[in-house]
Image (cartoon, grey):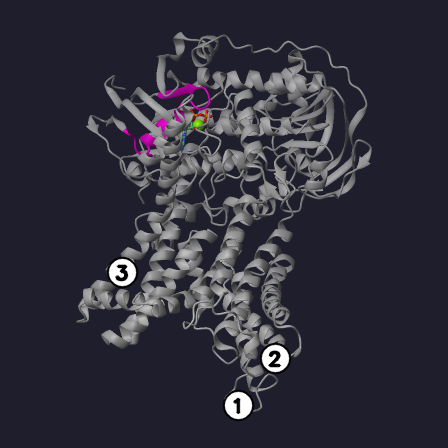
Amino acid sequence: MADQPFLRMENIHKRFGNVVASAGATIDVRQGEIYALLGENGAGKSVLMNILCGVLTPNSGEIVFRGAPLRLGSPSEAIRHRIGMVHQHFMLVPNLTVVENYLLGKESPFAVLTGLKEAAARIRALSDHYGLDVRPEAYIRDLSVGERQRVEILKVLFHGIDLLVLDEPTAVLTPQETNRLLDLLRVLVADGKTVIFISHKLDEVMRVSDRVSVMRDGKVVFTTDTKSTNPRELARMMVGRDVLMDLPTKAATPGRTVLAVENLHCNNDIGLPAVRGVSFEVRAGEIVGVAGVSGNGQSELALALAGLIPATEGAIKLNGENIRGLSPGEIGRRAMAHIPEDRHKLAIVLPLPLTENVILQRYNQAPFAKGGLLAPEAIARHTRDLLQRFKVKAGGVDSPIQTLSGGNQQKLVVARELARRPDFLLISQLTRGIDIGAMEFVMQEILKQRELGKAILLISTELEELFALSDRILVIYEGRIVGEMPPDRNRLDEIGLLMAGNAPAGGAVRPPLDEARL
Amino acid sequence: MKRSSPLAVPGGESGLAVADENSPPLGKMGQARLLHWATRALKAILPPIAAVALALLVSAALLAFNGFPATDVFTIMVTGVFHDVRSTSEVLLKATPLILIGVGLCVAFRCSIWNIGAEGQLYAGAIAATAVGVSFAGLPAWLHIALILAAGAAAGAFWAAIAGLLRIFFNASEIVTTIMLNYIAIILTDFLVTGPLKDPAASYPQSAKFLRDLWLLRFLPPTRLHIGILIAVALAVAAYVFLFRSSAGYAVRVVGINPHAARYAGINVPKNILLAIAISGAMAGLAGAVEIDGVTFRLYQDISPGYGFEAIAVALLANNNPLGAIFSGILFAALRSGSELMQINAQVPQVLVFVIQGLVILSVVGFAAFKRQTARPAE
Ligand SMILES: Nc1ncnc2c1ncn2[C@@H]1O[C@H](COP(=O)(O)OP(=O)(O)OP(=O)(O)O)[C@@H](O)[C@H]1O
Ligand SMILES: [Mg+2]
């Protein structure tokens, strides 16, 4: 592990119109280390890494890789220099198998015909070597999010790389999958690879990285050995002030029942039962958390409540009216707002401007529409208002929402849904991709909604988020509610046991968080 | 594949930057606005112009290779096409159906409905227009004309809606069904003009001729140019307002870009698919009616030289923007007239002319695909 810089990106500038994404960022990465990159939403982390991996070209600045200047025009050129990136949004073709995906875009278009067997053997060998459980013949569409991520990582390894860049790899993973990923990173480094890792989760950064840099406003403002820092300092460096990790909360004063779910059943997208007889209530002025290892029916529960997938049995009563079988539009008009977990698929329309994303559900309602025509002034004013209130970093209200950083997109979605003044708020993965400073703010906004007497269902795989916000926590396991717990961190073990399907009083228990370890 | 951000063009920056200044003097503001719009317009029209230029360049090489001096051929084309009022009016006459259909296809394509069946919808419109035109004698002329056009649009919409319904209820690809419906409409026309609609007095398979009173108004005599072109331009503007300024058009676009988000937002996806394909069918049917009532005055076989297919390229070249379709429609009409002149005045063989037309379409479609690839999301 030589100390001479393995990679140096120096004084990188990148502008998009009037938005400065990179304002002279400089980083040094040493061979064989895990290097973490932190920063607020929109600080320029993804842009800097996209420049490194040939997706974007900088306006100015220099990249020196292994002692030679590097100029990349495309991601495939980066691969040729043995630099690979796993983007936050997966780039796999769902209707192809793993091995077919790997051979796509390789040198010869006939590789898919001739090299399939050989490639599959190599994938299997690599997968065994790193303990990744990737089957070359599996179709991408049948894989879970965690599996897809391993497929993405193995894909980069398959193409042969020495420098691996991971952009918020853990944002979509469960704690178990995260542990597994962090273990994998250590193995990769032991194999001589170098890893750059972006995350908003300070504990992961503390656990796995050797060195860490903090970006702010397109510059690197702080770099240190991970050993000689702590989460508090990192948070302060990111946000410029101390971040409250614990929100002061008053006890809830629940009022009337707003949502009542009775014996709800529904299937997942391949027709197997996912929610199997769930009953609960959410009352005005309370936040009910739903905890569970992902894949235990909570995604389907949310979609069924929103009317996006059919419930096969049971009733969903919103303000006393059974809304089961109504369309998402009809349900939305009955004062339900929904922050979905799959932001890119459901919540936003990537190429459309911020303005047209902000009116997604209200495109034909006053004041955003008059006499069948859109009212651009009113829409722009409302958009500016939301951007300002939620401190969303954006070029202008007319820029496509895809030009926003991931966290800023999420903030805008939250802002939009809260602005609809719902009675019932259905939230999945509230803080996915949001930095810790913004997380504090967004959580406070949710608490304000509670004070306003809204009923809130908060589904999350992040226990921290649930502890910070919930008044009570339902634990879901294999499509059933298996227990209700107070949001008490001291009883974390009990919740963990419930999440793993063990009754708390049960005798022989296995440690829940280790089941998916390598 | 090289990716340069579409937003990184220097012109785009100045507009935004100035708009952000606190209180610029009014004159400067106006200037900046103008500059902003000018650069935006420029950026919008440059790629299609480049596409056409590229195709013409390759065509020139092809002509030269085959022993035709390219510059002479192109001079003959351009001077011939825009030689005088008459030749120019002939271009606009050909542009009329291309614009009408192209505008409708902009709406369908914005909804991601790949309607390849405009040709058949044009025939359906022409059949209905003819049926109405040769009956109802004694109606006031203005009402009769309105009925002819309405019948054409309705028939086109109906023909397209068949494909729309098959898509919605049986998930049948509209690409396949609209192509099959093309054959049905064209063969139905053959049958009608040899049978039920045949003019008993004529020896050719054709319908009876419309009464003079029913012909669309020619506003530039002695040329054949009729008010169809004005209708086309007016509807292009209307379609633009619908797509980009109205709530209903917004819903169509959201369905086209992300149907999952549309459902999440409470937009009725099947309804909008049906609406979009019906609008494109109505425009194609109207084009058929306008051809009958403005140019041929009767129905016969092969009344369309492939307008329905060429209009696909018209819409693509316009980037599915109805206002752009006015210009790309005129361009394709000019190419069509020009290639006739190539044959007649420069003795370029017809196959070569076809190759050149094909090159233009290929390069237009290629540019559209290229743009989709480069405009992928940032994260
Ligand atoms: N294609 C683009 N066009 C315009 N602006 C862009 C584009 N890509 C990124 N930006 C802007 O550059 C800035 C930095 O974005 P970047 O995606 O690097 O942030 P980030 O640090 O990764 O944030 P997050 O934690 O939210 O993912 C943001 O303000 C963003 O809006
Ligand atoms: Mg990012």
Q: Which mark is residue A450?
A: none
What residue is shown with label 2? B134
Residue B35 is at least partly visible in this image: yes
Name the residue type under label 1. Answer: Ala
Q: Position of residue B286 (x, y in %)?
A: 55, 66
What residue is shown with label 3? B56
Q: Could you give the CA–CA distance between mark 1 and mark 3, rounded to whole angstroms?
A: 43 Å
Q: Same chain for marks 2 and 3? A: yes
Report the residue at 25% width, 75% height from top: B345
Q: Can you say which quadrant of the picture contains the C terminus of chain B?
A: top left
What secondary structure is found at the residue carrying circle 2?
loop
Query: Is A35 left, or right, of B218 in this rendering?
Result: left
Determine whether B39 is above or below B169 in the image: above
Query: Is A442 left, or right, of B324 in this rendering?
Result: right
Mark 1 and mark 3 lie on one chain; the one further toward the N terminus is 3
Number of the front mark, 2 or 3: 2
Residue A50 located within the stretch drawn in magenta:
yes
Q: Chain of mark 2?
A: B
Magenta residues (range) = A34-59
Q: Compare residues B140 and B108 and report the one nearer the observer.
A: B140
